[in-house]
Image (cartoon, helix red, strand yellow):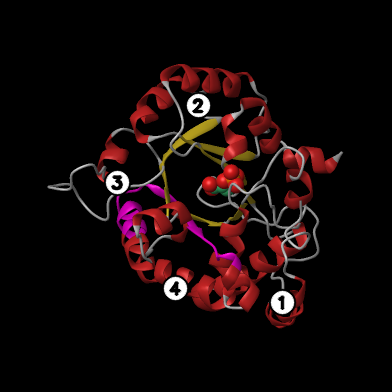
Amino acid sequence: MAFAAGCGLSNRTSVFRQNVSSQTSISLRPAKAPRQVVSMAGHGKFFVGGNWKCNGSKVMVDTLVAELNAGTIPSDVEVVCAPPSLFLERVNNSIRHPTYAVAAQNCWTGSGGAYTGEITADMLSDMDIPWVILGHSERRQLCGETNEIVAEKAGYAISKNVRVIGCIGETLEERESGALWNILATQMEAYKSTVTDWDKMVIAYEPIWAIGTGVVATPEQAQEVHAFLRKWVSDNLGANVASKLRILYGGSVNADNCADLSGREDIDGFLVGGASLKGESFVQICNAQTAMAK
Ligand code: PEP
């Protein structure tokens, strides 16, 4: 179901549309042709992340890894799977490299010490875990992580050579009121204040109203925001960073809706929650660009 349909937004949608139209008409990329992400540090590929969240058991994890290992992933797609931290080593030892890489779902703001229950970027690096998801809305909303905390984590992780999938996104109320642009810019500003190497960063735009709800943003809605973000990055971090930065869409992506979304010029990949728990669906999403080309 598309966001605009059935969400009771009609009386506010026009306000939102007026707000976005002035901000998102500029795309920094030419009309969609081949994907325009410039190769960076050996990557620059369409990117698909699987956020397994707090799901799994030894049996479930082993089954999922077997399904993923049996899948065909195009060589120009970078795929990163994020199991719960307890299973990171198990997955890293059994998943097919280099087709897949592994990410943690969180880490501490700095180095280790008396921080019960936490893991650090130093530990991830030591255990050969190359990625971490930070700033997911569930951690922001359920664990009280502010923009500042998330940014501190991102800056530290990158300083330890752990790449970051940095999440941002707005609530339904923020979208309806038109506040989303300020919310997104403020979230990006926080990352800007700590991240020193944007080659080690991807941004995941995850509207909170779309996460786990089955209400996916339309390709137009996602593209509007992605174009806004790319312009923000260009204005604030430079055109070079903007042309290289991969901006993922996340929120109820599945095997049926991924091809349309992947066809939009500023959508450089996905962060997938629920559909990443089924190997076959996730592999299909990783092949979204191929499906688009058919
Ligand atoms: C997520 O949690 O990052 C997410 C996008 O979840 P879902 O795909 O289930 O909406």
Query: Of 267 and 4, which appears nearest the observer?
Result: 4
Of labels 4 and 2, earlier in sequence is 2
Q: Which amino acid is tagged 4?
A: Glu
- Quarter-wise, where is residue 31 in the image? bottom right
Type of amino acid at the residue the image marks with label 1: Arg
Q: Measured along the vertical axis of the image, is residue 43 above or below residue 232?
A: above
Left or right for 104, reference 25: left
The mark nearer the N terminus, 1 or 4, is 1
Q: From the top left corner, tell me how far across and down residue 119 is, in percent.
A: 26, 42
Q: Nearer the viewer, mark 3 or mark 2?
A: 3
Q: Residues within 10 Å of mark 2 (few under 14, many from 20)?
A: few
Residue mark closest to the camera, 2 vs 1: 1
Label 2 SS: loop
| One can see residue 163 in this view | yes
Residue at label 1? 12
Per the model, the C-alpha gap separating discs 3 and 1 is 42 Å
Residue range of the region highlighted in magenta in the rendering: 153-172
Q: Earlier in the sequence, mark 3 or mark 2?
A: 2
In 3D space, how far apart are the residues under numbered discs 4 and 2 (Cα atoms)? Answer: 34 Å
Instruction: Check disc 3 and give the amino acid type.
Output: Ala
Q: Tell whether label 1 touches label 3 (CB within 8 Å).
A: no
Tell me the kind of residue under disc 2.
His
Q: Is residue 19 left or right of residue 117?
A: right
SS type, badge 4: helix
Q: Which residue is mark 3?
A: 121
* Residue ID for mark 2: 97
Q: Residue at x 77, y 66 (%)?
A: 30
The residues tagged by marks 3 and 2 sit, at their Cα atoms, a distance apart of 21 Å
Kindly report the distance in space between the C-alpha atoms of the residues bearing marks 2 and 1.
47 Å
Residue 7 at what x, y percent from top left?
72, 62
